[in-house]
Image (cartoon, rainbow, N blue to C red):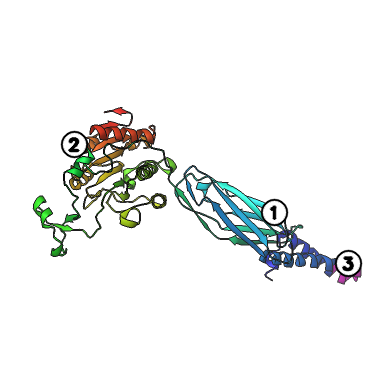
Amino acid sequence: MGALAGMTTRGRCLLAAGLAAALCSIVLNERDLLRVSVFVIAMPVLVCVLTARSRVGLHTERHITPIRTPVGGRAEVALNVWSTGRLPTGGLLLQDGVPYTLGGRPRFLVEHLPRNNGVQLRYTVEPSMRGIQHLGPLRAKVTDPFGLAEFDRELAGVTRLVVVPRIQQLYGLPSGSGLGAGDDGSVRLHSGQGEDDAVVRPYRQGDDLRKVHWRSTAHRDEMMVRVEETPWRGGTTVLLDHRESAHKGSGPTASLEWAVSMAASISLHLHRHGHQIRLVTENGRSIVAEGGEGVHSDHMVLDALAALQPTHQREISVVADPGHGQELVAVLGAVDPDSLDQLIRYRPRASRSLAVLIDTRAWAAQGDEQVTDPEKAVNLLTGAGWSTVVATPDTPMAQVWTNLCRASANRGAMHAGGWS
């Protein structure tokens, strides 16, 4: 009965016609009509049985090259289909499951699949949105040449494709970049100033008094306790603001996607120039699982950013300096003075601090009144000794980075399109 469940409407009609002819042959006592009716009845039943058996012997493998693809890139998918059944397979319709962000669902028609011989099918996907995408499952519809039987089967499961952010080629480095602080990074190295290994935060009820950091308490006139966190030594920290409320737009053209692409480009650019990179969020937490000594490789950064989702946190909230006294490059969305005040408070003025401020007004829909003017943020950060640049979608990322390098050299603030 399982084999007969795949009988098509045509097959069922043929079976009904055969049964009717058999009944008439008995009533009319026509032996020749009975022979014809037996043939008509047996044909759809036999076809269903053979088609069901050929379905069992189908096997498929899926291969994606490359397995890590940038937004706007292209990946090739190869499907190897073969049969181990005793009967040749024909009328095979294949459809692979592809998310809409990768393109349309490909379909293939294999008219004849010989026994123990396979075919290779290929198609390409062009991701338009970063993320962890899944291709599959691959479904097959097996039919017979007469259209009397039809069976569905899942041949291949799901294969993961990592769509990483688009990387832009950047040029140049901020003045004294990677050395930590001051107008010239060499000043810090020769002044005997070391970084404070203690990562502290305000005291909360229930904290262990043995963790009180008395030096910070005396300096800030507020009870401070140590945070159990391995200090970040050397290199550059890239801070990415991925709060949903801090960005505008949707889909691939959203300001958040621009920020993720910018953070990825900066991280890879600095890493290729010998910098140790640490990637954190607006609350100071690491986005990437820590590697040796907290160092993040390019693949680790890209994979983590591919899976990054916006957070519903409303404000920037840090309990310590996210850069641990070392160089910090922040990619910020819309920020209010309170959030910036908290970020500035924990950031030592002597430490080198740079910020890319996204002008979310350029990404906002017409009529959206909930937009923030970045000028106030520019003034606050500049007054705290930060080098800042305002970015819009019309200015290439490479130009934004070049302007930030110039702002760092001049310890001033400028817009992506020119001096403010």
Magenta extent = 23-35
Quarter of the figure that contains the C terminus: top left
**390 inside magenta stretch:** no
Q: Secondary structure at mark 3?
A: helix
Circles 3 and 2 in contact, beta carbons < 8 Å? no
* Amino acid tagged 1: Val
As measured in the structure, the alpha-carbon distance from the residue carrying label 3 to the one carrying label 2 is: 101 Å
* Mark 3 crowdedness (10 Å alpha carbons): few <14, some 14-19, many ≥20: some
Identify the residue shown where x is 66% and y is 66%.
Answer: 56
- Looking at the image, which residue is at 61% across and 58% down? 139
Q: Toward the viewer: 315 or 293?
A: 293
Of marks 2 and 1, the one in the foreground: 2
The residue at which mark 3 appears reads as: 33
> How far apart, in angstroms, are the residues tagged by discs 3 and 1?
37 Å
Marks 3,1: beta carbons within 8 A: no
Mark positioned earlier in the residue sequence (3 or 1): 3
Earlier in the chain: of badge 3 and badge 2, it is 3
Quarter of the image with the N terminus is bottom right
Is residue 214 toward the left or the right of residue 113 in the image? Answer: left
Identify which amino acid the numbered label 2 is placed on. Gly
What kind of element bears circle 1? strand
Instruction: Name the residue rendered at 50%, 47% in the picture.
Output: 101
Q: Is residue 239 visible?
A: yes
Task: Find disc 1 in the rendering and name its residue.
Answer: 110
For disc 2, the marked residue is: 383
- Which of the two discs, 3 and 2, sits closer to the camera? 2
Image quarter of residue 206: bottom left
**Predominant secondary structure in magenta?**
helix
